[in-house]
Image: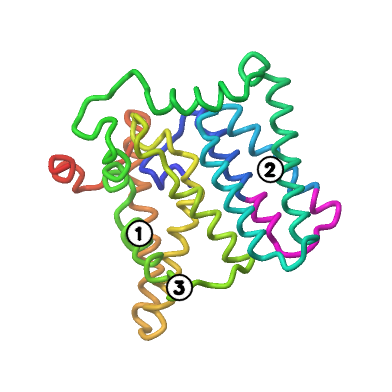
Amino acid sequence: AIPMWPGLSMFDIKDVPPAAGYTFVTLGLIEVLRGREPTRRQALWSLGLLVGGLVLSIGTRPGLWPGLAASFGLAGLIALRRSGRPRRLLHPLALMSAACLVAYAMLWIAYPAFFSSPGAWLIDSVLNSADYVGRPSGPTGGSWAYLPSHVLLLVPSLLLIVGVLGCVTGLPRRVPELTPLVAGWLLVSTQALLLPFQSLLYDGLRQVLFACPAVSLLLVFGWRKVVTDVGRDSGVARRMLPWLWSAALLVPLAAQVQLFPFAYSYAVPYATSLGAVL
């Protein structure tokens, strides 16, 4: 169901490993920050998620490493903030460090010509991602407005508007305590929102597929917030909102099925007028 969120009815298979890998890393970091000393099985599970996620994401798209590094850095800061004793800080830092070392060793063994020089590939992968030669045409091609405009044009309207409204109203009024749940949502938000606004992108939102699983979670959270708040005081709204949610999912899906295989992208009904303005 995830392809529908960015207005697509399919993905190029080569775009799936980076998205899956980034999601495994986010899940692994959430597991690491669950707030208790892990058993050996839990530690191996967390380590496997982190190593597998790093190998999948960086092995297929090395330019993702800044976002992954930001997620690891955020997890480290959360662990430091929540740790009351040095021993509690040792477990998450040891797991995250071990995952990075094991993943890099696996990448070096698999692709020695590329990963044998850490400084070179770290810099070159970012520069190549930000300086793609095939500059697309159009007013937003390669500019900061490319991603925001395509989000408005391609993501089904009801999903986007209600989801964003719910996320904004669901923000806490004061800085919350860093519970495992809050830490998890911070990591999900990092995956969803840390996007390459200055990179030269093309072909819609396909290249930022790595953000789609996390964006889906945030939009579901926003919808749940709206349904809970509005339905609390109105029985009619409580009965109608699930139908509205179903329509927001199924109507764009029906349009995509009609388009496929002649076209695999979906645009909102007002895309032509909005595209002219942008």
Whether residue 92 sits left or right of residue 113 in the image: it is right
Which of label 2 and label 1 is nearer to you?
Answer: 2
Question: Which numbered dot is residue 172?
Answer: 3
Q: Label 1's element?
A: helix
The stretch drawn in magenta includes residue 255: no
Q: Position of residue 174 (x, y in %)?
A: 46, 75
Q: Label 2's element?
A: helix
Residue appearing at x 80%, y 51% in the figure: 43
Whether residue 78 sits left or right of residue 10 in the image: it is right
Q: In this view, which residue lies farthest toward the front?
A: 86
Which residue does the numbered mark 1 point to in the structure image?
247
Kindly identify the amino acid type of the residue bearing the numbered disc 2: Leu
The stretch drawn in magenta includes residue 34: yes
Name the quadrant containing residue 171.
bottom left
Disc 3 to disc 2: CB gap under 8 Å: no
Disc 2 to disc 1: CB gap under 8 Å: no
Cα–Cα span, label 1 and label 3? 29 Å
Magenta stretch bounds: 27-43
Kindly identify the amino acid type of the residue bearing the numbered disc 3: Pro
Q: Label 3's element?
A: loop
Q: In this view, which residue lies farthest toward the bottom?
A: 233
Name the quadrant containing residue 99.
top right
The residue nearer to you, when weighing 56 against 197, is 197
Whether residue 173 sits left or right of residue 186 in the image: it is left
